[in-house]
Image (cartoon, rainbow, N blue to C red):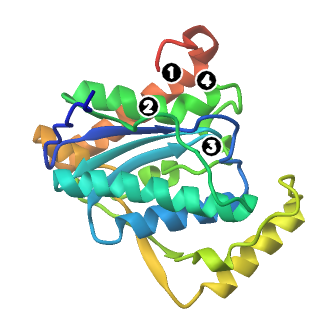
Amino acid sequence: MPRTRRYIRAKRPFELDLRVREGLPFACKLLIHLLISSALARAQRDSKVIVCHYLWQGNHLHMLIIPLDAEQCVNFYQDLQKKITDAMKRILGVSRLALWEGDPVLAEILDCEAAIQRIAYYYANPTDADLVNTIEEYPGLSSWDDFNNAALEVHAVQSHEVPWIRLPSIPRLKSLYLSDSQDRALTAALIEKNKKKTHALSIQPHAWMAAFNITDSEEVGALRERIIYEVRVLEENCPVLAGVYT
């Protein structure tokens, strides 16, 4: 039976969720952070989508994006999945790896309130999973700092230069259990080997607001504070609310 064709509206906010089949491959290690950041920056390099928010946990990703073109949006998340899979294959020393569970979930966020609640949920997710008490304590990869540090302008950009990690430079790990010193050494070696070519990983935390005609800096600031407030509410009540959100 053919798959249902996705209807992706350009310049509207969408939630992108990716999940793995099994295990926790996205460990909170510097090496994994580097490989994911490199894959994300490489997939985003030709402005397929605007990335607003993201949070990676051990086995899944929550991301809020703005597609600029329907076909390019599909190319973006397929490219991201492929690049991460290829990097994981190098680490594991395998030629085949069925990493992802089913199709990506891509759902349009239809109103401002829904966007606020979903973004707050992303950042409260580590607390809901009983990993940390607050998002500030979470050692995994997220756009929380970019969100807090971005200027109060709807198109404010937080940009980071990330090395393009070539596959041949990624070593097979002798053990999946890396000490902190091993993690730092492997990460530093990969950066050194791939320092000649970088891509900008650009985050626009407030860009989604333009879809709902919010552009005034005071309104942007008020919505940012509202999201932070909702994060704190969820963090305080996560044991009670566990399982409410998918």
Residue 158: quadrant of the picture: bottom left
Secondary element at image label 4: helix
Look at label 1 and name its amino acid.
Answer: Val
What amino acid does circle 4 point to? Asp
Instruction: Find disc 4 in the rendering and name its residue.
Output: 128
Element at badge 2?
Answer: helix
Residue 185 place in picture, x, y as percent: 82, 74
Question: How crowded is the residue under tag 4: few (<14 C-alpha within 10 Å), some, or many (20+)?
Answer: many
**Taking 242 as reference, is 109 above or below it?**
below
Residue under label 1: 233
Q: Is residue 88 left or right of residue 7?
A: right
Q: Secondary structure at mark 3?
A: helix
Q: Is residue 95 above or below residue 117?
A: below
* Mark 3 lies on residue: 136
Label 3 and label 1: CA atoms lie apart by 15 Å
Q: Residue at x 18, y 50 (%)?
A: 70
The answer to whether the residue labelled 1 contacts the one labelled 2, judged by CB atoms less than 8 Å apart, is: yes
Q: Earlier in the sequence, mark 1 or mark 2?
A: 2
Label number found at residue 243: none
Give the structural element (helix, strand or loop) at label 1.
Answer: helix
Residue at (26% x, 32% y) in the render:
3
Is residue 214 at least partly visible in the picture? no
Number of the label disc, if any, that sits on residue 120: 2
C-alpha separation, residue under disc 3 versus residue under disc 2? 13 Å
| Residue 237 place in picture, x, y as percent | 58, 15
Q: Compare marks 3 and 2 and give the one earlier in the sequence.
A: 2
Mark 1–mark 4 distance (CA, rounded to whole Å)? 12 Å
Give the answer, above or below, for where 118 lies relative to 65. above
Residue found 34% across the figure and 50% down from its top: 52
